[in-house]
């Protein structure tokens, strides 16, 4: 067993890499993985959970600590197989060439992940929209970020997209947002009555904040409608925006119907100025009908 453990696998600079040194290096990496996982859960989910820090901030602290542990463990694992600072410099030069060719996307996403964790344009628990997809951020990994939609579909988004693309963060700094719900009513309606109906409908919908109070704008005159817009604030319905708008539309329809206010349907009136040829078609049609009757008799 001693001979097996001391068997030389290869040589790095002036250091012999043996089976025992490789096993020690693997043991250090396994211990590093366990330590990083335990520390992240202990710090983010136990200790910091007792503070007033947001869930995104707790997640960021846990991730950064785990990265530091991995950096220290990686150095120890390399040192166990004889890769010292001098050898590491040579290895880094070779690695830099490899990064320049084949690993640039991985490095770009890794650096972008660090920027996301430090600057926190998005954080775990945020409701975001990217590439016309909306969902909740549930995990920020080394290379990518996991987003869960309302349909329980998980999107794996490269971290670099959060640096280069425009991202709508519905939860950034504040979870309160304002919805704009448009509606058109019949042109003969009383605008003040319509405004009262829309405000009454806002008071009926669960999830609309009383402060700031809902408001109604008279947008203008359409081709056959008076155009209004109901503005209301909410912080409970970020993850169910279509359902929220649906509830508002139901309430508006009920209040408008109760007051006898019509929501018009587009109509077109067709006027025929000349009827040239219609009499002839009508005569031919009558002749054809009479001939069929004669044949039947």
Image (cartoon, grey):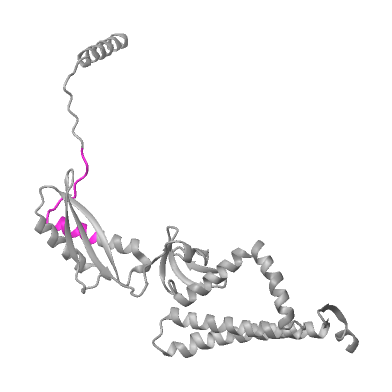
Please determine whether, in this image, residue 282 is positioned above or below residue 49: above
Q: Nearer the viewer, residue 257 or 184?
A: 184
The residue drawn where x is 66% and y is 69% is 96
Q: Residue 146, how many percent across, how many down?
A: 51, 68
Residue sticking out furthest to the right: 3
Which quadrant of the rendered structure holds the N terminus?
A: bottom right
Asked whether, in this view, residue 114 is left or right of residue 286, the answer is right
- How many numbered circles does the render carry? 0
Which quadrant of the rendered structure holds the C terminus?
A: top left
Q: In which quarter of the image is residue 56?
A: bottom left
The residue range painted magenta reads 250-267
Please determine whether, in this image, residue 224 is positioned above or below residue 35: above
Q: Residue 98, how many percent across, how many down?
A: 68, 66
Q: In which quarter of the image is residue 282?
A: top left
Q: Residue 30, how many percent across, how many down?
A: 68, 83
Q: Which of 87 and 38 is in front in this view?
A: 87
Please determine whether, in this image, residue 288 is positioned above or below residue 11: above
The residue drawn where x is 32% and y is 72% is 236
Is 3 contained in the magenta span?
no
């Amino acid at each position: 067993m001693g001979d097996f453990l001391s068997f030389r696998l290869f040589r790095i600079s002036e250091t012999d890499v043996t089976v025992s040194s490789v096993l020690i290096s693997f043991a250090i990496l396994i211990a590093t993985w366990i330590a990083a996982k335990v520390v992240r859960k202990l710090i983010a989910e136990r200790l910091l959970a007792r503070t007033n820090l947001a869930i995104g901030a707790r997640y960021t602290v846990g991730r950064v600590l785990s990265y530091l542990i991995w950096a220290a463990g990686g150095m120890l694992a390399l040192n166990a197989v004889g890769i010292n600072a001098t050898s590491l410099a040579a290895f880094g030069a070779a690695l830099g060439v490899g990064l320049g060719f084949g690993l640039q996307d991985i490095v770009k996403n890794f650096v972008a992940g660090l920027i996301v964790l430090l600057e926190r344009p998005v954080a775990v628990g945020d409701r975001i929209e990217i590439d016309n997809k909306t969902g909740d951020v549930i995990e920020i990994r080394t290379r990518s970020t996991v987003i869960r939609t309302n349909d329980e579909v998980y999107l794996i988004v490269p971290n670099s997209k959060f640096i280069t693309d425009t991202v709508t963060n519905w939860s950034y700094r504040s979870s309160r947002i304002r919805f704009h719900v448009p509606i058109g009513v019949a042109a003969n309606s009383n605008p003040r009555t319509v405004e009262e109906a829309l405000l009454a409908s806002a008071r009926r919908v669960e999830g609309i904040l009383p402060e700031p109070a809902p408001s109604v704008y008279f947008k203008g005159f359409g081709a056959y409608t008076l155009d209004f817009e109901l503005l209301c604030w909410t912080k409970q319905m970020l993850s169910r925006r279509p359902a929220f708008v649906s509830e508002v539309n139901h309430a508006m329809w009920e209040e408008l119907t109760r007051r006898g206010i019509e929501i018009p349907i587009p109509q077109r009136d067709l006027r025929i100025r000349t009827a040239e040829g219609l009499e002839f078609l009508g005569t031919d049609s009558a002749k054809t009908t009479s001939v069929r009757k004669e044949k039947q008799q």
